[in-house]
Structure formats: C-alpha cells, structure tokens
Image (spheres, rainbow, N blue to C red):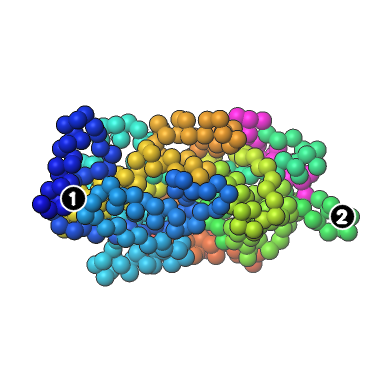
Amino acid sequence: MSRRMLIVIGIAFMIAVGGHLPATMAAAPSKPITITWWINPWRIAPPGFPDDKAPTAEDFPKWASEEFMRLNPGVTVKYEVVTNTGFDQKIAAAILAGNPPDVLRPIGFKREWARQGLLEPIDDYLTAEDKQDFYQYALDVGRVGGRYYLFPWNNSNNGMGSTLLINPAIFKERGVGIPAPPERGWTVDEFMQVAQKLTFDRDGDGKTDVYALSFPAKELLVMMGWMHVFGARLFNADQTEVVLNSPEGVRALQFVVDAIYKYKVAPEGAAGMGIYDSINMFHQGKTAMGYGGPYEIGRIDRYVKDGQLKEAFPVHITQYPHLAEIGPIAHHTSGGFVVFKQRDAEKKKVVMDFARFLTSKDNMTLLKSLLYVTARKSVNKDLYKGSTFEKEVDVYTRALDYGVPYFGTDITTDPIDKHLQAMFEAALGRTKTPKQALDDFAREANKILFKK
C-alpha cells in the first residue's frame, strides 16, 4: 500500500471517530511539491524558544518551514533570509530571470507587480472570517484593480516615523513631565520647551552631554514623519506631482534645521547619521528621546541578551508633536506575504495554504516576541493583555489611528529615494537652505516620476 493511501486512510479514520485536523493539514499531493519563500530578517521567537536567548533571523523561518512540512506530507519548503541591504535588487533580478520565490514578504508592497501580472490574486483564499478579522486598511495595502494580492501579517512597522521613545530617567533628572497617557500627545511648542530642558551638560565641562533627540537624515521614515507634522506631503492629492517643496514642507524642514543649529537640542552631524546612529545615541543615554514603537523597546532587551547593551532601561512611547491646526500624525503601514504567479494548479493551492499558514491567528501571535502589532483584530484584542508592555502598546495603537502613508498609496518611490535622502542631507548639513534643497528635490523627482 502506498504512503499516500495510508495517509488518506488515516485522515478518514480521524474524521470517522470525530477527530479534527490542524487547519493546515492536508492529504499528500499527487506529486512532490517544493515551495520557495524569501523573507527579510525578522528575529521572531518560534514556539518553545528559550526566554533567556535572543532569536536569530533564521529561527522563525526554519520553524515555519519545518512545521508546515510536518503538517503537509509530500511538501518541501525551502526558505531564504535575504538581508535588507540589496533586498529589492535581489528580487528584481529573480523576477527578470523568471525565477522569483513562490512566497515573499516584500519590503513595501509593489503594486506594479500586480499590474504586470506577476502576482496571484488571493481573493478566493480569503474566508469571510478573514475579511472581517483583517483590518480593512491592511487588506487595502495589497488591493489593486479591485482585487487583493497581499496576505496581511504585521500592522505598522518598527514604529519609525510613527512614535517617539522617551527615557523616563532623563526626564526625571531634568524635572520634566511626561505627556499623560493614554494618548501621550503634545504640541510642537510644548515639545520644544521640553527639548531645551532635556539638552544639558551633565559633567560641567562646557560641552553638551545629553541632547533631547537626534535627526538621522539617512532614515527617510523618521524624517518624513517630521515633514508630516507640519502638513507636508510628498505628492499632491491626485498623485500627479511631487509637492514636498510646499510652504508646509519648507516650514517642516526649517524646524528640523533650527532644532539643530538655533535651539541646539539635537547634535550637529545629522547629515551623516543613519537610524542605528540615532538608536545607539538613545541606548547610550546621549539623547533623552529616540524613535520607534514597541519593537524598539524589545530591541533593548535583545541587545542586552546579545551583549550589545550593558543593561536594560525602562522606555515609554509618546506621539510625535503636533500642530493644533493639523492634529496628531503618525506613519502607518502594513506588510504581509505575496504569492508569485503559479503555473501548476495543485502547487498553487499548496503555496496559498502556506501563505495562509504564515498569517493564521496562531502564527500571527508570534509577532508578540518582537512587540509587533498584528494585522488581525482578534489577535490584537488579547495579545498584550496583562503584559508589562500593555500600556505602551495601547499608546502606540492609539497613535496609529492618526496614521497616514508616507509616500502615497499608488506610486513606488524607489527611483527618487536617493534624491529624497540627498535633500535631507543637504538641508541638515546646511549646504543648501531648506527651500533650495526641497525645490531641487521636487524638480528632479518630478522629472523622474512624471517626466515634468
């Protein structure tokens, strides 16, 4: 008797005696099937992972692959962890060669892939329960031409551009109050008053030892967060022109430059700073505030376990400051998994089952090990209840209610990202005025994207 027949008989017996199968359990396929999937580094702890160890980027995909193979005899899953640096170039090369992975967690959903017919629509694989459970905005991230192409997974990102982190010990040292929960919001004027008190010479040598915060010009998510505070947007309403050089944009960028050079609440050298420079300053107590959401709080714990940080310290989440006439603003995005076009119908179903497995309720709870918020309402409802992070996650999710997309919803900004970064570098390095830097960027970006 064949292995396949034994499995079928076993399944029939389970059903006959009133048993049930795991959600992803299926009869063996009629032929061996191999699934390939790529994911960028996510240090997620799989079930049973030791609490005293920091997971690596390999632990989650290795577990997920092995667990799906266990539940689906006859299926082989091959994963690859692709570094963030060069990620887009690697997938572009694979697509050009006609050999993309079956499943991918893209760094930013690429709508042109759906328009070019490279992706499988997933509408037929979303249950009625799924459609009620996933946040609609998370589903809409992958909606193109009235169809869905992205299985939602994470809700927002690591918090860059969404919220700020504060070190309460430094606030207390300077006699500065923390914005009150549950919103923890503050105006731009309140923020600047506090920022000046948080910038000080601790050892009396005449040099600033602690700044309120830093501005990493090379981190576009963080810097665009500041642009949004003042009402600036990258594109106009119908997304036909780059308009970041609006009066609101100039005011926003001038605010950042003044924070560094006029009020001196942030260190000079921002033009050369990336996000890890900013994170390290915060971790080392050289800034009272940093960037990020719950994930970045978790990073502190991981750094301690890895030996990169001597000891953990408490952190609170607060909103970016806002203007009264505009109101609170936060970056909001969602990510998930796409399925590339399949030629074989049987394999297509198995690949879809794997994407559904990754985004199932049970497996989505694993994002808690990163202190991430998920794309499912039912999972988020109780995910952090009773946790020491419950209050901070609540502040974060409240901020996300004010979420706006950074770069518009239909336009890929990859071709202009380096020009956007150069604009921030020029303004923060004072090689150009904010208006000059923005005008030069807008002119170049419009040529590239809109042939203007």
Please determine whether, in this image, residue 258 is positioned above or below residue 154.
Answer: below
In the rendered structure, the answer to whether residue 27 lies left or right of residue 143 reads left
Q: Which residue is mark 2?
A: 203
Task: Name the residue furthest left.
Answer: 1
- Upstream in sequence: badge 1 or badge 2: 1
Stretch of the chain drawn in magenta: 180-199
In the rendered structure, the answer to whether residue 304 lies left or right of residue 79 reads right
Please state which of residues 143 and 249 is positioned toward the viewer in this rendering.
143
Task: Name the residue furthest right.
Answer: 204
Residue 81 seen by the camera? yes
Query: Looking at the image, is mark 1 or mark 2 nearer the viewer?
Result: 1
**Structural crowding at the residue carrying mark 2, measured as other residues with C-alpha within 10 Å and reported as few (<14), some (14–19) or many (≥20):** few
Count all numbered tags in the image, as a single digit: 2
Marks 1 and 2, how far apart in space?
69 Å
In magenta segment, residue 196: yes
Please state which of residues 399 and 122 is positioned toward the viewer in this rendering.
122
Q: Which residue is mark 1?
A: 28
Q: How far across and down, in percent of the image, does residue 292 sit?
A: 57, 47
In the rendered structure, the answer to whether residue 417 lies left or right of residue 258 reads left
**Residue type, label 1:** Ala
Q: Residue 416 sits in which quadrant?
A: bottom left
Q: How far across and down, in percent of the image, does residue 18 sit?
A: 21, 29
Residue 239 seen by the camera? no
Q: Residue at x 70, y 55 (%)?
A: 310
Q: How far across and down, in percent of the image, does residue 32 sit?
A: 19, 58
**Residue type, label 2:** Asp
Q: How far across and down, in percent of the image, does residue 74 sit?
A: 21, 54
Q: Residue at x 73, y 52 (%)?
A: 285
**Structural crowding at the residue carrying mark 1, measured as other residues with C-alpha within 10 Å and reported as few (<14), some (14–19) or many (≥20):** some
In the rendered structure, the answer to whether residue 259 lies left or right of residue 253 reads right
Q: Secondary structure at mark 2?
A: loop
In magenta segment, residue 144: no
